[in-house]
Amino acid sequence: MGNKLYRKGLVLLSLAFVLAGTLSCIRDEALGKECDITAVSPEWLQSLPSGFLVGNPIVRNRTVTFMVTEGADVTAVAPQFEITPGATLFFVEADGTATPYNTERTRDFTLPQTYRVVSEDGAWSKDYEVSFAYPQPTDECGFEDFTYNDEGQYQRLLQRQTDGSLNANIWDSGNAGYAFTGQAATPLDFPTTFIEDETSLDGRYARLRTLSTGVFGTFVGMPIAAGNLFLGEFQVQNAVMDPLRATRFGLQIVKDEPQSLEGWYRYTAGDVMTGGSDAERDACDIYAVLYEVDPADVVPLFGDDVKTNARIVSIAEIGDAGEPTEWTHFDLPFRTVEGKTFSTERLRSGGYALTIVMSSSREGAFFRGAVGSTLCVDNLKINWKNTAQ
């Protein structure tokens, strides 16, 4: 027994040295080659007129999205960014040429504009599409439209808006974190995918699966990854060090008081629980949360308070979902939290945010769940009470 423990300790120690060495090599190799927009300038954000932006800018790998109030003038805006230390920022003109960035020049964001970050050593560059758009409320989602992340590793859901356009910055998942594990050979090997097959209810559906994270995940204390999909943003830079804060739930896309969350689902739980007792059975989760925000300083909900935060006004959740193998309809009423009321005045000032969350393992955020658990969801819809005037 002692020898087995000793050998296991040597294996883990060796793995630690390998990972540390790998990370060190990656860091050294990347020195001077990084070329990212890391954030939007806080000083510039503070200089904007009150009520211009809706919520926080969303900075992804190659996009920056600003959500603005309906009717906002975006024809002459000069956004400012924070970039990788040592890198240089450029405007990319309509003809593809790059010109030096300056903080005074405005651009017409009726259509997205492109910016280029060039690394300190000049050998690397990355283009960012920067857009300003009005966030249209999400009424329905059939999971029909998707794209891939920039590296083509995994699928990302596109939301069709009421004007017919597609928005790539409303829904997110933890797929970007799973990419670190090296477990996926194709986009369909990730926890969150969009599938059309012989079991489809109507076109594509969302398939969320709880998967093993392999050696890497076990080493960092995250042995499983639950398939999830939610309104909000996944900040991959926090995925390992602070996973509960990596998920930022909610967007200010509330057009009225929500009445219910409706859709179709089926579910199969995996056989062996990770992080729980042998007697436990995995369970899925589907829910929506309406909560209060300060329009001038929007703070989202996170993985550790998405159902408990004091700013929550109402919740719709599936409860005991069971394991239906056939497509099953749900219509979940929003139940108001004690002491809270819905305010039309707050609605008009942009003081509410909404998230919808789906997960193949209810306790997946805490790395409790069963590998193989699979939740399928289709034809999701928010029903509103039509109280807005």
Image (cartoon, rainbow, N blue to C red):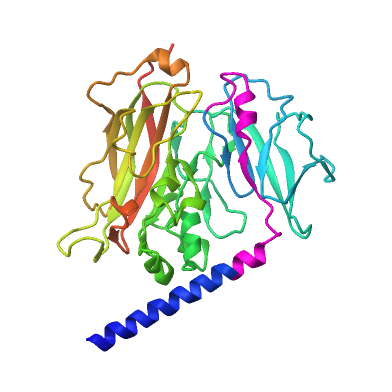
Which image quarter: residue 41? Answer: top right
Judge by depth and name the residue closer to the eye, 125 or 297: 297
Q: Which percent across, then down, holds residue 103? A: 76, 33
Judge by depth and name the residue closer to the eye, 19 or 307: 19
Which image quarter: residue 289? Answer: top left
Q: Which percent across, then down, holds residue 198? A: 40, 58
Residue 6 vs 346, above or below: the answer is: below
Q: Which percent across, then down, holds residue 51? A: 56, 19
Judge by depth and name the residue closer to the eye, 350 or 111: 350
Which image quarter: residue 331? Answer: top left
Q: Which percent across, then down, holds residue 189? A: 46, 64
Give the residues in magenta: 25-54
Judge by depth and name the residue closer to the eye, 116 or 356: 116
- Left or right: 133 as drawn, with respect to 240: right
In magenta segment, residue 38: yes
Q: Quadrant of the C terminus?
A: top left
Q: Can residue 367 be seen by looking at this rendering?
A: yes
Q: Quadrant of the N terminus?
A: bottom left
In magenta segment, residue 385: no
Residue at the location (39% across, 81% down)?
11
Residue at the location (85% across, 45% down)?
97
Residue at the location (40% across, 64% down)?
220
